Amino acid sequence: MAPDGVCVCNVIAGRRRLLDVVRLWDDTFSSVRILATDPNYFLVGTVRPLDAEEATPERMAENMRGWAPLAQITRDVTSMIVDTARHLRERTLIGWFTVEEFVVLLHDPDVIV
């Protein structure tokens, strides 16, 4: 991959397999974020580490709005991303997560996967 490359993978899996895939991506890429839309989990891996500002839910939503064809399709997904903090508080597996946040939610038996 190019130094600024991004790899995205859509995963639909149960809790155990999802953990395996997230761990593999975390071992492979410098930065990994997960866009959870239930039942789809989009893993986003980058070669270059992302700084804290680049990887925020707000920045992700802003980037998606900038892609005209995608923005039309993903209005609901964009709102999910922006509402990530609320989803974390509510222990809902929807939003834009770090690996650590996502794994904590996956380990919570009350969170539906």
Image (cartoon, grey):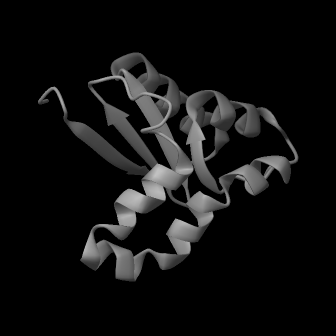
Location of residue 62 with respect to 111 vertically, above or below: below
Residue at the farthest front position: 53
Relative to 81, does residue 70 appear above or below in the rendering? below
Q: Residue at x 72, y 50 (%)?
A: 85
Viewer can see residue 86: yes
Q: Can residue 112 be seen in the rendering of this structure?
A: no
- In the rendered image, residue 87, in percent from the top left (x then y), is placed at 75, 55
Say which of 49 and 106 sits in front. 49
Q: Nearer the viewer, residue 13 or 5?
A: 5
Give x and y (percent) for residue 62.
42, 60
**Position of the N terminus by quadrant:** top left
Image location (x, y in percent) of residue 27? 42, 17
Q: What is the residue that sits farthest to the bottom in this orientation?
A: 72
User: Which one is in front, 47 or 22?
Assistant: 47
Residue name at image x 35 percent, y 34 percent:
45
Where residue 3 sits, quadrant-wise, is top left
Residue at horizontal 11%, vertical 30%? 2
Q: How many marks?
A: 0
Q: Outermost residue, top direction?
A: 27
Left or right? Give the position of 111 relative to 43: right
Residue 21 percent across, percent down from the top left: 47, 33
- Describe residue 63's horizontal placement relative to residue 67 as left or right: right
Image-based side of 66 in relation to 105, left or right: left
